Image (tube, helix red, strand yellow):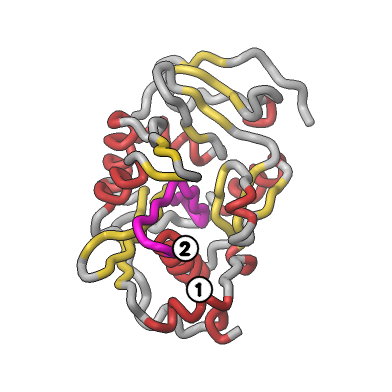
């Protein structure tokens, strides 16, 4: 692995990111500081496998090692969840309510009996990703019950890369339902994996694994060569009638 370099402070040039392989070892993956959340800079960052993550100013840019990824063929669906899918109680859509999905991801949530704030998805971050969505680069999957939004996931897509940012659930399994539909749709478009940024035990239960950062960067560089699916996304009809549910 290349030696880490002094932290770079970003200037006016939105393309001037340092080599992600030179990110700090501790904190893991911190690469640069400053800049802005303009669409041009965000796209330049994602194209290089870099993402913003910060609680307060200044903006911090990251490329951790190793990198958490979900290979689409590795998605784990439990027997119980397959039964839930087959019952058809959820209505799942794409790119119908992006702003609400990101707002719900940013909202306080109950975890292990405590209220946690999604502070890193600040109003500034929300606006930046809504701008990307309006330009056709950021996408959401929404899960509804009786026309009420109960779960979803959102992220950024370039080439055949999908960089997942966050998901939420107001009802059991709703975020997993959103992820399953995203995976199935991306498979139809010949994507290979979803970037999940940082590994966690919870993500591992869904099939998420890790890649060496250098290999991850090689893969996204290859996937960047394909045309991006810019614009509003739609779920293919009969998406669930596939091998995942037949297993």
Residue 204 as seen in the image, left or right of residue 227: right
Badge 1 marks a residue whose secondary structure is helix
Q: Position of residue 93 (x, y in %)?
A: 30, 67
Q: CA distance from mark 2 to mark 1?
A: 9 Å
Mark found first going from the N terminus, 2 or 1: 1
The rendered magenta stretch, by its main secondary structure, is classed as strand
Residue stretch in magenta: 157-173
For image coordinates 39% across by 52% down, the residue present is 168
Q: Is residue 13 visible?
A: no
Reading the image, the residue beneath label 2 is 176
The circle on residue 81 is 1
Residue 58 in the image: above or below residue 108: above
Quarter of the image where one finds residue 18: top right
Residue 37 visible in image: yes
Q: Nearer the viewer, residue 29 or 44?
A: 29
Please give the name of the residue rendered at 53% of the width and 76% of the height, measured from the top-left corner.
80
Please say whether residue 164 is one of the residues in the magenta stretch.
Answer: yes
């Amino acid at each position: 692995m290349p030696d880490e370099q002094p932290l770079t402070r970003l200037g006016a040039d939105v393309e001037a990111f340092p080599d992600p392989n030179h990110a700090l070892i501790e904190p893991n993956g911190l690469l640069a500081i400053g800049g802005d959340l303009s669409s041009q800079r965000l796209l330049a960052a994602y194209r290089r496998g870099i993402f913003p993550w910060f609680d307060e100013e200044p903006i911090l840019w990251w490329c951790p090692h190793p990198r958490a990824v979900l290979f689409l063929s590795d998605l784990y669906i439990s027997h119980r969840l397959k039964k839930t899918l087959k019952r058809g109680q959820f209505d799942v859509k794409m790119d119908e309510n992006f702003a609400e999905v990101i707002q719900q991801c940013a909202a306080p949530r109950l975890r292990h009996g405590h209220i946690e704030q999604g502070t890193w998805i600040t109003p500034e971050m929300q606006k930046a990703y809504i701008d990307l969505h309006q330009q056709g680069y950021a996408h959401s999957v929404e899960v509804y019950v009786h026309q009420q939004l109960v779960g979803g996931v959102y992220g950024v897509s370039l080439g055949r890369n999908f960089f997942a940012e966050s998901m939420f659930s107001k009802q059991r399994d709703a975020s997993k339902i959103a992820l399953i539909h995203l995976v199935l749709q991306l498979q139809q478009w010949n994507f290979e994996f979803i970037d999940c940024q940082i590994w966690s035990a919870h993500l591992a239960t869904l099939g998420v694994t890790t890649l060496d950062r250098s290999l991850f960067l090689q893969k996204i560089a290859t996937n960047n060569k394909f045309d991006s699916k810019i614009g509003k996304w739609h779920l293919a009809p009969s998406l669930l009638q596939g091998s995942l549910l037949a297993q």
